[in-house]
Image (spheres, coloured by chain):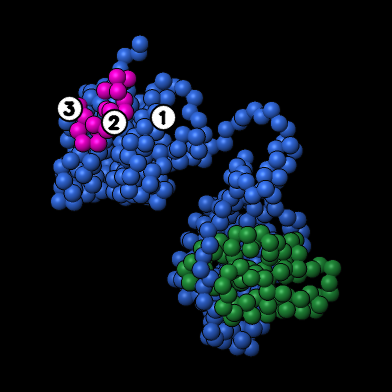
Amino acid sequence: MAKEIERAGIPVSQITSLPNIAAMANSNRIVQAHGIIHPVGDAAMAPEEERELRRSLVRKALEALQTDVEGPRLFK
Amino acid sequence: MLKPLRVVQYVNQFFGQLGGEEKAFVEPHVKEGPVGLGLATQKELGDGGQVVATVICGDNYVGEHLEEAIDIMIELMRPYKPDLVIAGPAFNAGRYGMAAGALCQAVQERLGIPAVTGMYNENPGVGLYREKVYIIETGSTSKNLPEIIHRMAKLGIKLVNKERVGKPREEGYFSHGFLVNELSDKKAPERAVDMLLAQFRGEPIEPELKLATFDQVKPAPAVKKLNEANIALVTDGGLVPQGNPDKLEWMAATKYVTIDISERDHLKGGEFYANHTGYDTSEVNDDPMRLVPLDVLRELEARGVVRKLNPTLYSTTGVATTIEYSQKIGSALAERLKADGVDAVILTST
């Protein structure tokens, strides 16, 4: 799906817990998510801590969107 | 001795010896016996068969009137009561290949007899018809024609006689994409180790399963100015409003759904839930922003880090979705995102 959107010229940052699969399918801008059941959150965290986690993942995704890439790349 | 096979040959204007592109508008017609390339087929068949007729049609005619041309050719063939139709080979000629593939399919379906064609692997007819008809692989030009005709005729005769057809590699046709069960005298672990050792020795191996392949897409250029960008949120985690009004599938999705977030800066549990069989959705159901980071994007929008958050959130279910549907959903979504004027996407995946 990410690829079809990129084919249309729109960059996609994919936040996923399975970056290897995303890379195998040739998704280009990949950010490691926090976990499969909660890509950008965690019920075990305090609300403010959880929000900070989400901020940092979104920041990473935006950084990826501002980066030119040659092929699948994981942004850590 | 079996009675000789009755074969009808289909050729374009060139292989029917009418001429080149200037004859490409010639309408379908039939000539008794072998003509042009049909003579090569007759030579291959020898006493075992007879090219009873040759159907000729110009490539432009068939290109512009495919269905009509196929209808006419089928009716031209019918009176000759063929046992087998040989179409082409079309090599790398696109119009000819499309016509040969369509004709073979129509012959199978409407005349109830086998048909065989031949094409180069980049002929568009291969992609369209390889799963439906037998297409012998050829080079891009008519080099090795006798060998190609030999393979087409040999496979055709097997099909007529309902003999077992060998593997694509053995017979030289494009795989139909089927898996055929076979008994092996070696157990799976032995075969796996044999294959591994062969790879160490640098020998060719033939995997028993074809692995899925993914095409590559040139990465879209980076966003130059984030503060001028419209960012869209997309998820494959199956987020839907309570009641799932657009009936998003909970697995093997065939579509995406839209969620209007223009009036929202939070997503609350109870108003939305994850309709997805592929993960434990309880945490997302309690707080959907563990899947879709709406609150953070609204913060960034308010601070001017991004110009705008797209008013529509797009959601689908990424579990047991076929590659084909993922592509369809993706390209439909891409159109929609373009129409929205979206500059970049954040996709969250479970």
| Magenta stretch, main secondary structure class | helix
Which of discs 2 and 3 lies nearer the camera? The answer is 2
Tell me which residue sits at (20%, 39%) in the image: B16
Q: Nearer the viewer, mark 2 or mark 1?
A: 2
Residue B261 position (above or below residue B149): below
- Image height of A27 relative to B9, above or below: below
Instruction: Say whether residue B40 is magenta.
Output: yes
Label 2 amino acid?
A: Thr
Which of the 4 image quadrants contains residue B285?
Answer: bottom right
Chain coloured green:
A
Report the front residue among B75 and B208: B208
Question: Alpha carbon of mark 2 to alpha carbon of mark 1: how far?
Answer: 13 Å
Is B133 or A54 nearer to us in this picture? B133
Magenta-highlighted residues: B32-50
Confirm or deny contact between disc 2 and disc 1 (CB under 8 A).
no
Residue at the spot x=59%, y=63% of the render? A26
Q: Nearer the viewer, residue B260 or B197?
A: B197
- Does the image show residue B194? yes
